[in-house]
């Protein structure tokens, strides 16, 4: 995140070999992300067909002052989207800094495990969904971070399903949706989320 904030990652693209420097610069200019994250972004953008209220940014081109002025939706874990790091201290479920195949539950409730492990991408995974205030409390943030693309898409499916969100809100017993953090266990086949719980 620090390298995104001060743009110092650009310096790391320089190398003594001009061909390698050119290749690194080309890669840095690409708007990279998973096709599943793109699908979620497309479905979110469809909620505002005139594009008056929703704007899409590649993480590398996003500017931190926008978080102070607007609500924000962040797709991807801090490994794929460093802006998630601005919220790390507010999150209970986080990707382990020591084990890339583990989600840490910082404050487990009675009967909850301290960690959730997932293996090589296959048929199961997790998606962390956070709805919380922005760091300066001038707006709200929605963070959708999956263990791979399919779990991220499953998180988007959950949020965009009126039926699932109504059941979730009923389970919370709240008339208005409060800030929340949710860990979904997902099942999927390559390219397609099947179910989440």
Image (cartoon, grey):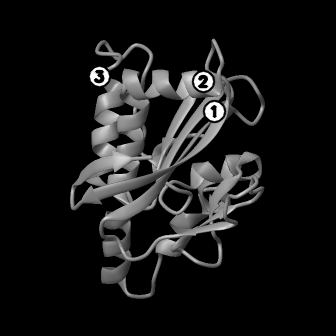
Q: Quadrant of the N terminus?
A: bottom right
Closest to the observer: 189 or 145?
Answer: 189
What residue did someone put label 3 on? 46
10 Å crowding of disc 1: few (<14), some (14-19), many (20+): many
Q: Residue 169, how many percent across, how many down? A: 56, 23
Residue 150: image quadrant is bottom left
Query: Image point 63% across, 69% down: which residue?
Result: 96
Q: CA distance from mark 1 to mark 2?
A: 5 Å
Q: CA distance from mark 1 to mark 3?
A: 22 Å
Q: Residue 162, how many percent across, how many down? A: 39, 21
Q: Is residue 2 above or below residue 135?
A: below
Q: Is residue 74 above or below residue 105?
A: above
What residue did someone put label 1 on? 67
Q: Is residue 101 left or right of residue 8?
A: left
Closest to the observer: 115 or 66?
Answer: 115
Q: CA distance from mark 2 to mark 3?
A: 19 Å
Is residue 65 visible to us here? Answer: no
Query: Image point 34% across, 26% down: which residue?
Result: 45
What residue did someone put label 2 on? 70
Looking at the rendered structure, the secondary structure element under dot 1 is helix
Residue 94's disc number: none
Q: Residue 86, how many percent across, how many down? A: 69, 48
10 Å crowding of disc 3: few (<14), some (14-19), many (20+): few
CB atoms of marks 1 and 2 within 8 Å = yes
The mark that comes first in sequence, 2 or 3, is: 3
Looking at the rendered structure, the secondary structure element under dot 3 is loop
């Amino acid at each position: 995140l620090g390298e995104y904030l001060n743009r110092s990652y650009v310096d790391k693209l320089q190398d003594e070999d001009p061909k390698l420097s050119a290749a690194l610069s080309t890669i840095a200019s690409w708007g990279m992300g998973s096709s599943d994250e793109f699908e979620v972004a497309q479905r979110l953008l469809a909620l505002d067909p005139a594009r008056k209220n929703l704007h899409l940014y590649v993480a590398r081109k996003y500017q931190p002052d926008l978080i102070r002025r607007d609500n924000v939706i962040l797709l991807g874990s801090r490994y794929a989207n460093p802006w998630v790091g601005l919220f790390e201290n507010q999150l209970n479920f986080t990707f382990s800094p020591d084990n890339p195949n583990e989600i840490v539950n910082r404050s487990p409730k009675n009967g909850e495990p301290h960690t959730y492990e997932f293996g090589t991408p296959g048929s199961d995974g997790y998606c962390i969904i956070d709805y919380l205030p922005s760091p300066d409390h001038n707006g709200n943030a929605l963070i959708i971070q999956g263990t791979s693309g399919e779990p991220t898409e499953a998180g988007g499916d959950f949020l965009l399903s009126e039926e699932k969100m109504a059941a979730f809100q009923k389970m919370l017993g709240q008339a208005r949706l409060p800030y929340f953090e949710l860990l979904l266990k997902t099942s999927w086949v390559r390219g397609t989320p099947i179910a989440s719980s």
